[in-house]
Amino acid sequence: MRNAVSDTYAELSAVRKSYGSTTALDGVDLAVRGGELLALLGPNGAGKSTAIGLLLGLFDADAGEVRLFGESPHALDARRRVGVMLQSAGMPDTLKVGELLAQTRSYYADPLDTAECAATAGIADLLDRRYGRLSGGQQRRVQFALAICGRPRLLFLDEPTVGLDIEARQAMWSTMRELVAQGCSILLTTHYLEEAEALADRVAVLGRGRLVAEGSVREIRARVAQRRIRCVSELPIEAISAWPDVRSICRDGDRFEIVTHSAESVVRRLLSQDARLSDLEVERAGLAEAFIEITQEAA
């Protein structure tokens, strides 16, 4: 029976999974909705790979429920609506890229044609090359092509841009945005927090096998009181660093960057002590700072 919530593509409900005495997931609730990019974040060992493996039916939960398009993740109909790009891929090195693409396309009823898929993933110039002779970054682009060739409704991308240069990474980001705009959902894991900040509609943070934060990038950032103050000032850096609300300070020429949990008091003091203060900016903590604070609290 299909899930009554039609816009929930994949779901973990009160899921527990252990490996011997090690608990990988401990009562996790997680949902991937239609037409969104969900960034699943967490330090190494937090349970991200286990969560993806359960949703893909690579192994079974010890407790709780796992649903993929309202069905068991082992159901063929559900699996055919999924594309996957994992960190490790056991591809036959001797096959040409075009042969790998043709083989993978054959698993789907309505795949992208070879030319469109190759152009989308940026591998048109690699089709006649043997997979084993490609660089690591080229192999990642081929793996991305194989993941999207079946027109997936849900795409699992596990650290997809590792090994890519800046141009290839930006191109993949652009393709991800286009796929989501077309109605594809993406579950993304990444250690590049600027990637999650740039792409994610929602963020879920795992820590020690538990879901410790979930929400939009703005909501996750708002959980951290830390602020960044930038300004041009003639005050000595030693004086500012001694103020009780200043956590850290650095200087580039006459421009300061101050980290604080009490931006208002620091700004008032700056203005009162330096009448020539200029270029004042106050910025909320980024996703990276929020992630560090949230995961440290969980630990």
Image (spheres, grey):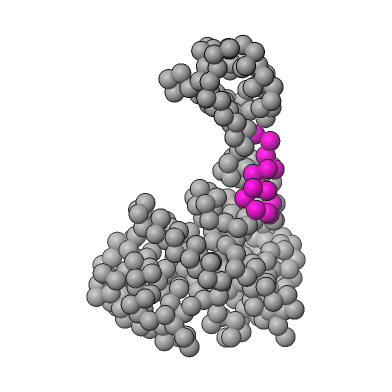
Say which residue appears at 29% left-offset and 61% top-offset.
135
Rendering coords of residue 18 (x, y %): 67, 64
Residue 11, placed above or below residue 292: below
Rendering coords of residue 291 (x, y %): 61, 45
* The magenta stretch spans residue 215: yes
* The magenta stretch spans residue 57: no
Residue 254, placed above or below residue 141: above
**Quarter of the view holding residue 113:** bottom left
Q: Considering the image in quadrants, where does the C terminus appear?
A: top right
Rendering coords of residue 281 (x, y %): 57, 29
Q: Nearer the viewer, residue 81 or 283?
A: 283
Rendering coords of residue 83 (x, y %): 50, 74
Residue 208 visible, this angle: no
Q: Nearer the viewer, residue 298 or 155?
A: 155
Q: Nearer the viewer, residue 298 or 277?
A: 277
Which residues are drawn in magenta? 213-226
Residue 159, placed above or below residue 34: above
Say which residue appears at 39% left-offset and 59% top-offset.
171
Say which residue appears at 68% left-offset and 64% top-offset.
30
